[in-house]
Each structure stands twice: as structure tokens, then as C-alpha cells.
Image (cartoon, rainbow, N blue to C red):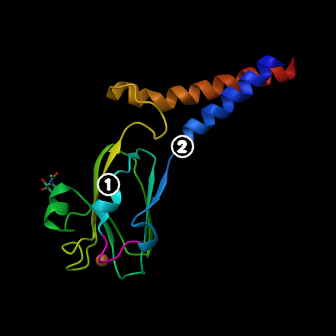
Amino acid sequence: MANTLALVVLLVAGYAALASATTYTVGDSQGWTTGGDYNNWARGKTFAVGDKLVFSYVNKAHTVTEVNQSGYDSCSGTNALSDDDSGSTTVTLTTPGTHYFICNVPGHCASGMKLAVTVSATPSGSTPTGGAAGDALKAPAMGALVAAATGALIKLAMS
Ligand SMILES: *[C@@H]1O[C@H](CO)[C@@H](O)[C@H](O)[C@H]1NC(C)=O
Ligand SMILES: [Cu+2]
């Protein structure tokens, strides 16, 4: 019985670690609009692979355009990596590194509608082990742990 309890605790902890991605509303209650200071908004926040950015704005009044660093620096959406003006854009940060977003309505980026976020490979809430290999192994390793614990629990339940 004590073993079963330990396995349940392990399982819950494993799932919690897997599901610790954070969803951020860009600009908080102000949303994605002119007059915002998005680099100020991003300051002090940590972003990790799996986290989501939600951009909220009036449909077609703005765009959420992901660009590379040149596009960000020059406020050009010409070589956009993605583009949306639906009014509610959710971006899942799937790769580590810096991700750049601008509004592609003329003048808006230059007046501050631009956001750069640095995304770490380590899922938020876990302790970094250092090294890209360690980070890459972490999520599958946790999945294997959860799978092993689930298997052991099923065996215990059936015995
Ligand atoms: C951004 O993309 C453009 C077009 O694909 C490319 O010419 C430029 O070198 C890129 N800049 C950076 C910093 O990656
Ligand atoms: Cu805009």
C-alpha cells in the first residue's frame, strides 16, 4: 500500500512537471495595441519552450507578425515567418532562442508594437541541468518515468 502511494505521488509529480507550460497574455489587460511598451512588459518574465503567448486586439486593426531579427530591427514584415490579424493570436513557443513579433500595420511597429522574447530550452518550473543535450533529454526522460510508474501501478493493482 505504501508503495502504491509512493507511485501515485511520483505520477502526479511527473505529470505536473510535463504540464508546467505558462500562457502569457501579451500586454496583460491592455492587450496588443499602439501605446504599449512590450519590451517593458517582457522584462523580468522567463519564457520556455512550450509556453504560449496570447495576443488580444481588435480584428484586423493590428497584426501579429513573427519576423527574424532584421525584420524586428527594421520594422519590416516582408519576410514574415507567420502572420495573423484575426484579433486573437496564440503563439506556442516551440523552439529555444529569441522570437521576434511586430505589428505590420504601417507605423505601429515603429511606435512600439514590437516584442522580442528569449525562450529557454528548459521547461519552466524545472531545474536546469546545463547543456543542450541535458535539456533535450529532459522531457522524454520525464515521459519515460511517468510511463514506468504507470506500468508499475497497473501491475500492483492487478496483483
Ligand atoms: C532575416 O531573413 C532575411 C530574408 O530571409 C534574410 O535575408 C536575413 O539574413 C535574415 N536575418 C537574420 C538576422 O537572420
Ligand atoms: Cu498595430
x then y, percent, for residue 94: 40, 47
Q: Quadrant of residue 32?
A: bottom left
Q: Residue at x 17, y 68 (%)?
A: 76
x then y, percent, for residue 100: 27, 58
Question: Magenta part of the protein: which range?
Answer: 31-36
Task: Assess disc 2: are there few (<14), some (14-19) or many (≥20) residues with their C-alpha within 10 Å of its C-alpha.
Answer: some
Which residue is more in the foreground, 80 or 89?
89
Q: Ligand 1 is located in which of the four quadrants?
A: bottom left
Q: Residue at x 21, y 75 (%)?
A: 111
Number of dots carrying numbers: 2
Mark 2 / mark 1, whichever is N-terminal: 2
x then y, percent, for residue 30: 41, 73
Secondary element under disc 1, as helix, strand or loop, is: loop
Q: Residue at x 42, y 81 (%)?
A: 58
* Residue ID for mark 2: 20
* Residue ID for mark 1: 43
Q: Residue at x 61, y 32 (%)?
A: 14
Q: Amino acid at mark 2?
A: Ser
x then y, percent, for residue 62: 34, 77
Task: Assess disc 1: are there few (<14), some (14-19) or many (≥20) residues with their C-alpha within 10 Å of its C-alpha.
Answer: few
The N terminus is located in which quarter? top right
Which residue is more in the foreground, 14 or 2?
2
Q: Is residue 80 left or right of residue 7?
A: left
Secondary element under disc 2, as helix, strand or loop, is: loop
* Residue 37 part of the magenta-drawn span: no
